[in-house]
Amino acid sequence: MQTATISFDRFNNLADNDAQERIRAARARLGKRAVILCHHYQRADVFRHADLTGDSLKLSRLASQSDADFIVFCGVHFMAEVADILSRPEQISILPDLAAGCSMADMASRAKVERAWRELSTVLNPDQQITPVTYINSAADLKAFCGEHGGIVCTSSNAPKILDWSFKQRPKVLFFPDQHLGRWSGHKMGIPLDEMAIWNPDLEMGGLTAEQISKAKIILWHGFCSVHQMFQTERIARFREQYPEGRVVSHPECSFEVCQASDVVGSTEKIITTVKESAAGTRWLVGTELNLVDRLAEEVKPEGKIVQFMGGVICMCSTMQRIDPQHLAWTLENLAEGNVVNRIVVPAHEAAPAKVALERMLAAS
Ligand code: 13P
Ligand code: SF4
């Protein structure tokens, strides 16, 4: 039975303990009708309520397999969009705070990518010579662009595999929005750095000459993650000096230099399993978001493993952080009362081609 929507004003100043209590009570009322998916960067006071956790690839698979009526996504906007696209039409995807975006995803818009495609067509035939590849950290309309132009989606855990698929279709790749993931993945495939050109969307022809475009195997969009951009090789050098037996693991959104200086580079899920599966007593320096690192450090402490954070300053995904216990309590109580708040709906004309690009990725990875 539906009642009037409960306003967030009543939750805004709710004490943390009360919010926790109300989340538990609302969940008990909802039972299996709601599933809570949490990304590994989610803050601890929300993460503890997760039914399922993972990196972007794992979460997109889990969303597509869920039976729940409501998929409550404690992550960022593009993740809830993917859940909406891959779930059944009657399922409802919800983002507890609509302000939880991804600043990297915002660095590429459909208008700018379409302009790049048009400008590239003055040098070559993009629809025959370039596979567009979008990182899953992008808006649904860019995934749709890829679906419409023979392209595909990738995540941090399958990017080299997806590039391999892409080069089987066409000789070049336009990779957006994360230049670092694109460069690192291209490098892992053996593509020389001078065959990867940077496309600056604020400049005419991306700031490239026709010759540079013709030479490039991968055209990298000038986007980045402001959290992972903070990590520096100096911290790795100091760590190795202090602890020569120590190991370093980083996310591929870090700079090329940080990835090169690391022992292992991988998605959030890969970072966690690498540290968990290492020998007891191992010491790790970890280059990814702080909530994940703090949680991991606590989890492996009993085995005598030491996990250190790579950042010199606090590096949190401030947008994902906006999903707090107050917003989760508000969302769940409304659902329990029969009111859907903060539903994420991708319009059908975008969802269909975006699904094509996502399904190509799921099949190829
Ligand atoms: P993962 O897919 O590795 O979890 O990465 C998502 C992300 O946004 C990292 O910044
Ligand atoms: Fe986006 Fe960076 Fe946050 Fe990941 S950590 S969701 S890339 S802003």
Image (tube, grey):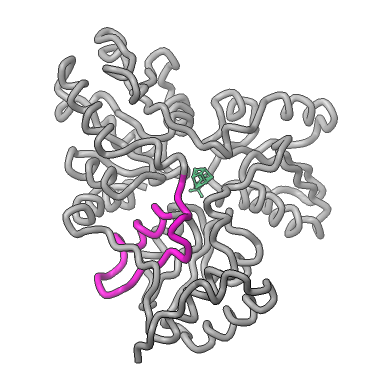
- Residue in the picture at 33% in, 44% down: 153
Rendered view: 74 above or below 213: below
State whether residue 279 is above or below residue 36: above
Q: Is residue 302 left or right of residue 227?
A: right
Query: 104 or 305, which lies in front?
Result: 104
| Residue 256 versus residue 101 in the image, above or below | above
Position of residue 246 measured from the top left corner of the image (x, y, whole percent): 77, 36
Residue at left 72%, top 24%?
Answer: 234
At which x and y percent is residue 177? Answer: 39, 35
| Residue 40 is at least partly visible in this image | no
Residue 89 found in image quarter: bottom left
Residue 106 appears at what percent x and percent y?
Answer: 40, 41
Magenta region: 77-102
On-image quarter of the N terminus: bottom left
| Residue 163 can be seen, yes or no | yes
Image label count:
0
Magenta segment: does it hold 84? Answer: yes
203 left or right of 222?
A: left
